[in-house]
Amino acid sequence: MNIEKISLRAYRNYDSLDLVFSPKLNVFLGENAQGKTNLLESIYVLSLARSHRSNNEKEMIQWQKDFARIEGNIQKNNGSLDLTMIISNKGKKTKVNGLEQGKLSHYVGHLNVILFAPEDLSLVKGAPQNRRKFLDMEIGQINPQYLHNLSTYQNVLKQRNQYLKKIAFSSNKDLVYLDVLSEQLAKAGSFVLYHRLKFVNKLEVWANNIHQKITYGKENLSISYKSQLSLTDELTEENLFELLFSELKESVQRDLKHLTTSVGPHRDDLLFYVNEKNVQNFGSQGQQRTTALSVKLAEIELINEEIGEYPILLLDDVLSELDDDRQIHLMEFIEDKLQTFLTTTSLIHLENKLNITPKIFHISEGIVEGNGD
């Protein structure tokens, strides 16, 4: 798939912008704070109906404007489609081929993107919530039902935690209602767990293959899903429901003491091992970065495996954070395979690393000039 063209109206520092892209490599070139990442972000928002940079959607609306609009024409194996994303003070509105979508889960998945930014290099070493977010965003792109169940899980989790605080110091503890909440939580949570486990198993295969190529066969990469539950690959979604529901019921007194839900996918994590050594705790910075690169590239292959076509790759100033060897592996991986958008302040990182001619968009103070050179 690829984005043929995009239109922005009142989006961040772009009052009105219409661009036509190359189906291969597109480079947004300019100094910092000129609008390169804003343009890249607009593609991400068009895909996932949210920003990777901010939780405050109003920031995307140009100053003193009522709303921002992003429109894109997408070319896919089965034809073309038009996507529209409107952000206002009242919320978000999404359209597919002009038809408004009632739920975000009906919209997300029409355009698949993989973002690779400098902060993703800390995917391995960073906080567990970063890895959970990574899982949720990528699985949600290929499975709309996952987003629905994840949203349900998060809502019920909030209710359960609020109820724990409400009854913790009460003499009249209605544990029956707490049991109802635990059952609802286990139902949505078992769906989330089942699809996370399937995703991680497939991701590990692709990531290890890529990691071996980057390290010239010197290192093997394995990925483990860390949970307080005793999980195995043979567990069905029904097994996971029974396991999670039982654990939630057993943890009631502990949860009442700590005023929070202590078990479930919201507590889980990913562990990475290089040659059977925990790379998060004992790996070098180089090993951690290679692992992160392998995982991000594995996402691309996994999405292609799941939906039958490659996603779009967004590289936000990431080349400057990689050494020459990793830059070469990254650029060789993407050539002629998928549409890529890259932000950079200099073309030096691309010299002698490309066999294709990129389309270059020069960006300065929100003004974009694309010359195709």
Image (spheres, rainbow, N blue to C red):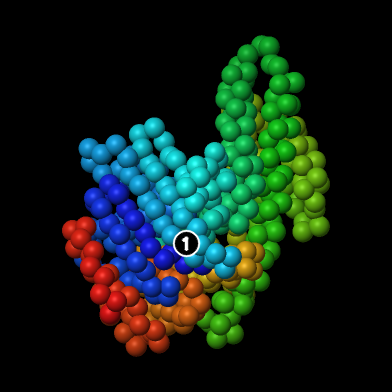
Q: Can residue 98 be seen in this view?
A: yes
- Position in image of residue 242 (x %, y %): 80, 41
User: In the rendered image, which quarter contains the C terminus?
Assistant: bottom left
Residue at 68%, 49% in the rendered image = 193
Q: Which of 18 and 178 is in front in this view?
A: 18
| Location of residue 107 in the rendering, given as x and y in whole percent from the top left corner | 53, 48
Front-most of residues 332 and 269: 332
Q: Which residue is drawn at 62% across and 24% down?
A: 164
Kindly identify which residue carries mark 1: 74
**Residue 160: quadrant of the picture:** top right
Amino acid, disc 1 = Ile
Q: Tell me which residue sits at (42%, 75%) in the image.
A: 24
Residue lying at the far top of the rendered structure: 171
Compared to residue 370, the image places residue 196 above or below, namely: above
- Tell me if 371 is positioned left or right of 251 in this view: left
Work out whether 265 lies above or below 115.
above
Q: Residues within 10 Å of mark 1 (few under 14, many from 20)?
A: some
User: Can residue 342 be seen by looking at this rendering?
Assistant: no
Instruction: Say left or right for 19 vs 142.
Output: left
- The residue drawn where x is 37% and y is 59% is 6
Q: How many marks?
A: 1
The one nearer the camera, 84 or 288, is 84
x then y, percent, for residue 224: 65, 61
